[in-house]
Amino acid sequence: QQQQEQSVIDYKSSREITKNISELTNTTFIISDVEFKELQFKGNQTVIAIVSIVDENGNITKYHTFSNILQEQLKEIQQYTQQGKWVRVKLMKTKRYYTFSSP
């Protein structure tokens, strides 16, 4: 009796691993895409924004934010990215809040 070889695959999480956008404070960068996802977080429904950022080599890295202020601005930015336009911003921290400003 011949034993059949077992196939093995690598696990790939369905959860996207992203960096926190606050890591980019005081830097200028280009946003190529914005998406919003609803999550269950500690029993509450919350929204997370996933931001695709393009570096000078054309590589895309995804960042996230729960910030309501940034999400409001990202809704405006998303109108441009949905038209295929990329948006250059600078991430600033004023007091306790993060905001996008002109570069």
Image (tube, rainbow, N blue to C red):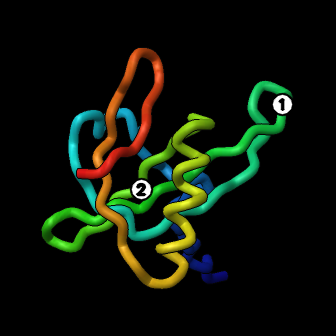
Q: Quadrant of residue 79?
A: bottom right
Location of mark 2 (residue): 62
State left or right for residue 102 relative to residue 85.
left
Furthest-left residue in this view: 56
Q: Which quadrant of the structure image shows residue 92?
A: top left
| Quadrant (top left, top right, bottom left, bottom right) of the N terminus | bottom right
Of pointers 1 and 2, the one earlier in the residue sequence: 1
Query: Percent x, y for residue 19?
Result: 40, 43
Residue at figure coordinates x 57%, y 35% from the top left: 67
Q: What is the CA distance from the residue labelled 1 to the residue labelled 2? A: 24 Å
Residue at image coords 53%, 68%? 8
**Residue 54 coordinates in the image, percent (x, y):** 28, 65
Q: Position of residue 37 (x, y in %)?
A: 69, 54
Count of numbered labels shown in the rendering? 2
What amino acid type should be assigned to the residue bearing mark 2? Answer: Lys
Q: Which residue is mark 1?
A: 44
Query: In front here: 1 or 72?
Result: 72
Query: Where is 15 relative to 99, above or below?
Result: below
41 or 23, nearer to the observer: 23
Tell me the amino acid under the disc marked 1: Asn
